[in-house]
Image: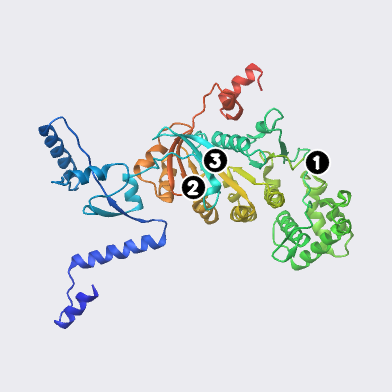
Amino acid sequence: METRREQNHKKGGNFIPFRMTDKLAELEELQQRLAGSTVELFEVSIFISLSAENKDDLEELTKYIKTKAAKHQVKVNHLVRQQEKGMNSVLPFGVDHMNKAVCTYLLTDAAAVLLPFSYRTYFSEDGVYYGINRVTNAAIILDRTEELNANGYILGTSGSGKSVTGKFEILEVRNKYPNDELIVIDPEGEYATLAQPDNFDGEIMKLSPNSTTHYNIFDIDLSFSEDGRDAISIKSEFIMTVVETMKGSALSSEEKSILDRCIHKAYYEYQRSNGLDDTKLPTLTTLYELLKQQPEMEASQLALIMELYVTGSLKNFADKTNIDVKKKYLVIDISDMGDQLRNVGLQIVLEFVWQRVIANKKNGIRTWLWCDEFSVMFSGEKSTESGKFFVKVYKRIRKHGGVATGLTQNIEEVVNSPDARAMLENAEFKILLQQKPSNLKLISELFELSPSQEAYLKTGEKGTGLIICGKKVIPFDNRIKQEGIVYKTISTNFKEYQEQLKKGAV
């Protein structure tokens, strides 16, 4: 283009043919797409192999294909005296013996129309089973931890088999990696069955106003440090955030100073024991009593704010922990948490998960986290803090040997939240189940799916869809036989639950 301008200038003109300006615009657009996304440019050669019983039939078939292609503005040429090279090119070795004589260049989405799926068999010795490849009918055995990050999502409309798919993965992970720790944040009360003694022999942390479960937010590992801060300073900052949520507005500098002073006082005796005497471990009640002893008026006001969570009806976090939080399978049931406890509770739940991840890393244990309906972290007027903390967990869990999975049917809420959308785009592992038309459009744009790939997300068949693992896109079928014990253990079908009630099986 510059050369043409220079030549025109010497001749006293500045005319540039439209064909050249149009080509320049196309090249600039191509450059922007390649630089600003995960789109790649592929060199593609397309060969069509034909066979027939006689020459006349072969010529007729060739004419038919050329005519069909021409209707779609595609030109097809047949090889003359180059049949051997053509035959070698269509063999399944991926070698172009025509020396790029018929090659073109396509972007990822265009190339995906021709090669929409990963046809190879995926079998990782360290992986778990995710179903059957609907193209090759081979088992899909994948190891998420082999990717850039192991974080993932399970996305599907209501009734698509989302929760069953999540539970199936939990079953597979528990059987494949018996030494790993599995934690589920359960907003619907669906995962407790797996914690029963005849299944995983896990533990259930039931958080609701009427629950007898207690978790001490002052539980701490004194040896932990981060960014040059000791464990108590980090814990103090977290507890101040919790109290701020209880208050419903930002803490003043005076209130922060009072809280920090009282928190350090609360840990004093426990520090003197070097963290060995659990009887001296403080609780939220300890902080409440210390605040009442302080001379400042702000301290009395803080104590009054905390009263509901210490002596009132929302005292799940007021006393010492009374469950075994070190079980290999732990369900955090928040289904009956209620709006009043929710905002404080979600912050504490996520901080607890983070502490477990850190503790497990020290012992060489990998932590798996599933959060069903994870959009709850980003919905509601006061979800800012829980959303921020959830983003932190997702960003950093990989560095501590953890694997996080979010499940949701509310894809619109996720896309509308900048933090949640960024987490979704950066995750390397996605299970896409059946989608509503409106959600399918969002997902297709988000993951750059081709029309043939989209087709697997609108069949209406439960437990089927696409798996995106790194750059692999695999159509899968993981429908579970209803008469099997696995299905009965993990099914969430209400009609089947009613039948079990009638039979006395529940």
Query: Taking the image as drawn, is residue 434 in sight?
Result: no
Residue at 25% across, 44% down: 88
Chain-order first, disc 3 or disc 1: 3
- Give me the disc on residue 412: 2
The CA span between labels 3 and 2 is 31 Å
Where does label 1 land, which residue?
A: 322
According to the image, label 3 marks what residue?
127
Q: Secondary structure at mark 2?
A: helix
| Amino acid identity at mark 2 | Glu
Comparing labels 1 and 2, the label whose residue is closer to the camera: 1
Marks 1 and 2, how far apart in space? 38 Å
User: Looking at the image, is mark 3 or mark 2 earlier in the sequence?
Assistant: 3
Dot 3 falls on a residue whose secondary structure is: loop
Quadrant (top left/top right/bottom left/bottom right) for the N terminus: bottom left
The residue drawn where x is 83% and y is 55% is 287
The local secondary structure at tag 1 comes to loop
> How far from the left and from the top, in percent, is residue 207?
72, 41
Q: Residues within 10 Å of mark 2 (few under 14, many from 20)?
A: some
Q: Is residue 248 left or right of residue 53?
A: right
| Among the 4 quarters of the image, the one containing residue 259 | bottom right
Q: Nearer the viewer, residue 491 or 359?
A: 359
**What amino acid is labelled 1 in the image?**
Asn
Q: Position of residue 326 (x, y in %)?
A: 74, 42
